[in-house]
């Protein structure tokens, strides 16, 4: 379990995470989405033990993350910006980090091979980091993040700048890690390939969770906030009376024949509203709720 309890985080005296409450069960694949990149990064850093919150507490299992004890042994944090030592080979680089984690020397080479095999990058074992193609750098960063076999992965935009083919490959690797029992928290954009594996998301705006749940439920909530537009060719007064009597209609804007309403009902209630308008004798054209795709909903 990873739990944030009334967590607030400041940066240069400005609050960037505001009273965050979030509880994630073991074995999740959870997405932090939305346009507030600073807040999402701060949430991941705090969970990894890199940035203490000014208020509130964070728990990994039954243990408080702060004061930091051995949190780094159980979490793997992959930053958005990757930094490498260009004059080291991939194997030397990985062995260096395994040494920092106090992993036994006889085990290091075997673990390096296991990680490179998982990433399908065995051919780069002896290659200097400065000579690795840029598109493979996110995979190297992920490899470093999983070297010590953490139980939680905290990944800040792991798909950044990957083309569709490499994005699919990254997804396959993450899916394999999840099947091994590792919990995943990703700050990420939403795209079609990720929706089958992403269990739940939280939309972060202005340092707060503005919506959370499955991708479908978050999308449906956002869609209900979209206006319904129509043209009323005849029976405007009768239509306005129907709107006034419907508790789910909370704003009406009229511009000659064109009408826009804000309506909090779902598909069934929307159909019932249209039926009521027709029964009232109105002549309606183009009755339609504005639509958006999930990417527009997440990024605005």
Image: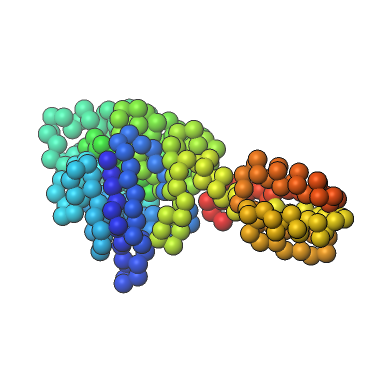
**Total marks placed:** 0
The scheme the figure's colours follow is: rainbow
**Residue 211 percent coordinates (x, y):** 47, 51
Q: Quadrant of the C terminus?
A: bottom right
Q: Is 62 placed above or below 111 here?
A: below
In the image, taking residue 272 as reference, residue 63 lies left or right, namely left
Q: Position of residue 119 (x, y in %)?
A: 36, 32
Query: Could you tell me which residue is drawn at 25 percent across and 32 percent down?
Result: 112
Q: In this rendering, is residue 28 above or below 57?
A: above
Residue projecting furthest to the right: 234
Residue 167 appears anywhere in the view: no
Residues 19 and 38: in front is 19
Residue at 24%, 37% in the rendered image = 150
Query: Where, by quadrant of the figure, is residue 173 drawn?
Result: top left
Residue 154 in the image: x percent, y percent?
33, 45
84 lies left or right of 104 = right
Q: Which corner quadrant holds the N terminus?
A: top left
**Residue at the (49%, 33%) spot, across then down:** 196
Along the line of sight, the residue nearer the viewer: 197 or 111: 197
Q: Depth check: 150 or 107 in front? A: 150
Left or right of residue 194, residue 11 in this image: left
């Amino acid at each position: 379990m990873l739990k944030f309890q009334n967590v607030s985080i400041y940066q240069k005296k400005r609050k960037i995470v505001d009273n965050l409450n979030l509880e994630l069960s073991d074995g999740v694949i959870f997405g932090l989405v939305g346009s507030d990149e600073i807040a999402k990064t701060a949430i991941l850093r705090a969970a990894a033990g890199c940035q203490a919150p000014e208020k509130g507490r964070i728990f990994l299992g039954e243990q408080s993350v702060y004061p930091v004890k051995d949190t780094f042994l159980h979490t793997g944090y992959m930053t958005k910006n990757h930094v490498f030592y260009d004059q080291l080979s991939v194997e030397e680089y990985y062995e260096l980090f395994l040494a920092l984690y106090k992993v036994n020397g006889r085990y290091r080479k075997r673990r390096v091979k296991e990680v490179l095999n998982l990433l399908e990058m065995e051919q780069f074992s002896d290659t200097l980091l400065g000579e690795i193609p840029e598109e493979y750098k996110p995979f190297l960063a992920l490899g470093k993040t999983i070297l010590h076999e953490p139980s939680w992965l905290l990944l800040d935009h792991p798909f950044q700048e990957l083309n569709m083919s490499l994005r699919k490959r990254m997804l396959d690797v993450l899916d394999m890690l999840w099947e091994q029992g590792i919990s995943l928290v990703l700050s990420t954009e939403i795209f079609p390939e990720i929706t089958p594996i992403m269990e739940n998301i939280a939309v972060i705006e202005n340092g707060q969770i503005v919506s959370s749940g499955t991708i479908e439920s978050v999308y449906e909530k956002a869609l209900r906030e979209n206006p319904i537009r129509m043209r009323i060719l005849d029976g405007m007064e009768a239509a306005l009376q129907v709107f006034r009597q419907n508790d789910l209609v909370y704003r009406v804007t009229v511009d000659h024949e064109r009408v826009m309403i804000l309506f909090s009902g779902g598909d069934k209630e929307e159909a019932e509203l249209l039926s009521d308008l027709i029964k009232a004798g109105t002549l309606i054209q183009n009755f339609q709720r504005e639509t958006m795709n999930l990417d527009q909903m997440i990024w605005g």
